């Protein structure tokens, strides 16, 4: 495995493991248990090297789990030091990309706003990215936008995460809108959030609960609306730009 493909592989795992971490997946704890057994390290230490002590608890867990996956998947390829170095580099790259792509509102606005979100997965599941744009009511001004690379994810998961990213952004505004029109080209997600469709998948159910919680905490009126993909070009373009940047 060449160095670049190794980093791509590790970077893709960042998205998968972060998702497991967010949902307290049993798979994540299985990997961590195996990691500590391989190294003979006390699980209570929660760190794999001196640099990881500078990270937050969630990032520390992600870093050590990623190293565990690399060690277990490619035991003949990676030594412990190589696995932790590659894990650290992949995690840092993911964090830096998110920091670069997250944008703040260019102006304060207290009128009615439009939030459009999108999620894209090339392969479903495959390499995925999410994005949102926040527009003035007449769509003449883009007040904010953001995008994020997920790693490997399904399209439905990406759609929810794109909406969550946008809702978190709206919730952080100092000047709250009088109302919010939320638009997405995922009919499934919109109808699930309206209560028209049931959510049978556990991961989607967790994401729906998170999105519903954000919606309930907005403190102003909102409407959920399904739109055609061609009307969601701005968010779609941000997703593709994010994915193309990984190539």
Image (cartoon, rainbow, N blue to C red):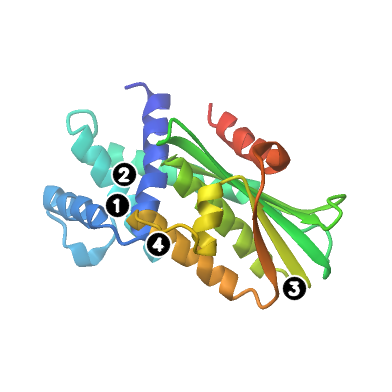
Q: On screen, 38 above or below 164?
A: above
How far is mark 4 from mark 3, CA to CA? Answer: 28 Å
How far is mark 1 from mark 2, CA to CA? Answer: 7 Å
4 or 3: mark nearer the eye:
4
Point out residue 19 in the picture as x, y percentages from the top left corner.
39, 53
Of residues 4 and 112, the one drawn nearer to the viewer in this rendering:
112
Residue denoted by label 2: 84
Of residues 82 and 182, the one drawn nearer to the viewer in this rendering:
182
Residue density around tag 1, few if under 14, some if 14–19, many if 20 or more, within 10 Å: many
Q: Earlier in the sequence, mark 1 or mark 3?
A: 1
| Residue 51 in view (yes/no) | no
Q: Residue at the spot x=23%, y=28% of the render?
A: 77
1 or 2: mark nearer the eye:
1
Q: Earlier in the sequence, mark 1 or mark 2?
A: 1
Q: Residue at the spot x=41%, y=59% of the render?
A: 198
Q: Secondary structure at mark 1?
A: helix
Point out residue 11 in the picture as x, y percentages from the top left corner.
42, 38
Point out residue 132 in the picture as x, y percentages from the top left corner.
65, 50
Q: Residue at the spot x=59%, y=69% of the render?
A: 215
Q: Secondary structure at mark 4?
A: helix
1 or 3: mark nearer the eye:
3
Q: Are marks 1 and 3 in contact (CB under 8 Å)?
A: no
Residue denoted by label 3: 174
Of residues 66 and 180, the one drawn nearer to the viewer in this rendering:
180
Residue denoted by label 4: 206
Q: Earlier in the sequence, mark 4 or mark 1?
A: 1
2 or 3: mark nearer the eye:
3
Residue denoted by label 1: 64
How far is mark 2 from mark 3, CA to CA? Answer: 40 Å
């Amino acid at each position: 495995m060449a160095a670049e493909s190794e980093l791509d592989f590790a970077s893709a795992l960042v998205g998968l493991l972060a998702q497991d971490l967010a949902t307290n997946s049993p798979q994540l704890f299985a990997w961590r248990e195996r990691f500590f057994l391989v190294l003979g390290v006390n699980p209570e230490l929660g760190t794999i090297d001196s640099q990881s002590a500078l990270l937050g608890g969630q990032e520390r867990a992600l870093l050590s789990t990623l190293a565990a996956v690399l060690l277990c998947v490619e035991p003949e390829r990676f030594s412990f030091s190589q696995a932790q170095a590659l894990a650290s580099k992949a995690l840092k790259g993911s964090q830096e990309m998110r920091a670069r792509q997250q944008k703040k509102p260019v102006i304060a606005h207290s009128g009615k706003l439009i939030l459009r979100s999108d999620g894209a997965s090339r392969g479903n599941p495959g390499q995925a990215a999410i994005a949102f744009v926040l527009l003035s009511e007449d769509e003449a001004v883009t007040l904010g936008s953001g995008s994020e690379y997920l790693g490997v994810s399904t399209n439905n998961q990406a759609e929810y995460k794109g909406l969550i990213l946008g809702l978190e952004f709206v919730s952080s505004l100092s000047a709250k809108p009088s109302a919010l029109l939320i638009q997405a080209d995922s009919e499934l997600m919109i109808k699930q959030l309206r209560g028209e469709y049931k959510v049978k998948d556990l991961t989607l159910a967790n994401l729906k609960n998170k999105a519903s919680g954000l919606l309930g905490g907005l403190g102003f009126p909102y409407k959920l609306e399904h739109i055609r993909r061609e009307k969601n070009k701005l968010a779609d373009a941000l997703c593709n730009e994010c994915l193309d940047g990984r190539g």
